[in-house]
Image (cartoon, rainbow, N blue to C red):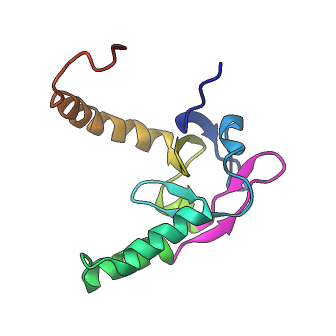
């Protein structure tokens, strides 16, 4: 198959040492040093260029007040760390991020272009349940219900 997607998901597990196996299909794109931090519900892994872009936008944005900046610093920056895939294709999730995101043994790894998200499977299932209705409502705003039909 010649089509390569820059999105997708796969089930994984968190081992006793806090390592999550990254799917083979994602590994090629996430080589070398990566940045890991926490997001609202999950661990987030970014390529360094994406991390720098995020920092630059945040620092130069005029929409954030002092409280916004402090929240971003507390959530994203204070817990950021550099990680790399090990020889077995795993990434170690730091304990503070595992605790905050409530990661348990069963995880799901999601790729969205240049970032990975590591979710606890139960938390992701609950999130999907909430977002499913929102996604359907959003799709119903499109002019045609046949958006997936090839033209």
Residue 142 is inside the magenta segment: no
Q: Quadrant of the C terminus?
A: top left
Q: Main secondary structure of the magenta part?
A: loop
Region rendered in magenta: 78-95
Whole-percent x, y for residue 102 in the image: 49, 54
Q: Quadrant of the N terminus?
A: top right
**Is 148 situated above or below 140?**
above
- Is 24 or 17 nearer to us in this picture? 24
Residue 90 is inside the magenta segment: yes
Question: Who's the residue at 73% across and 49% down the image?
Answer: 90
Whole-percent x, y for residue 73 in the image: 42, 79
Instruction: Specify the quadrant of the image occupied by residue 75.
Output: bottom left
Toward the right, the furthest residue is 87
Question: Who's the residue at 39% across and 59% down the image?
Answer: 40
Instruction: Specify the quadrant of the image occupied by residue 62.
Output: bottom left
Toward the front, the furthest residue is 151
Residue 36 is at least partly visible in this image? no
Question: Who's the residue at 80% across and 53% down the image?
Answer: 86
**Is 16 situated above or below 151?**
below
Whole-percent x, y for residue 51 in the image: 53, 67
Q: Along the horizontal axis of the image, is 22 left or right of 10?
A: right
- Is 56 or 11 nearer to us in this picture? 56
């Amino acid at each position: 198959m010649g089509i390569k997607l820059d999105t997708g998901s796969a089930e994984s597990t968190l081992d006793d040492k806090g390592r999550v196996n990254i799917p083979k299909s994602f590994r090629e794109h996430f080589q070398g040093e990566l940045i890991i931090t926490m997001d609202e519900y999950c661990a987030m892994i970014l390529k360094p260029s994406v991390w720098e872009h995020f920092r630059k936008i945040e620092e130069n944005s005029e929409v954030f007040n002092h409280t916004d900046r402090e929240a971003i610093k507390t959530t994203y920056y204070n817990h950021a760390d550099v990680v790399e895939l090990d020889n077995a294709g795993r990434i170690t999730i730091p304990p503070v991020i595992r605790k905050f995101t409530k990661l348990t043994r069963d995880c799901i790894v999601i790729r969205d272009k240049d970032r990975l998200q590591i979710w606890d499977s139960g938390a992701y299932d609950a999130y999907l349940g909430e977002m499913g209705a929102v996604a359907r409502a959003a799709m119903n705003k499109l002019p045609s219900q046949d958006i997936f039909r090839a033209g």
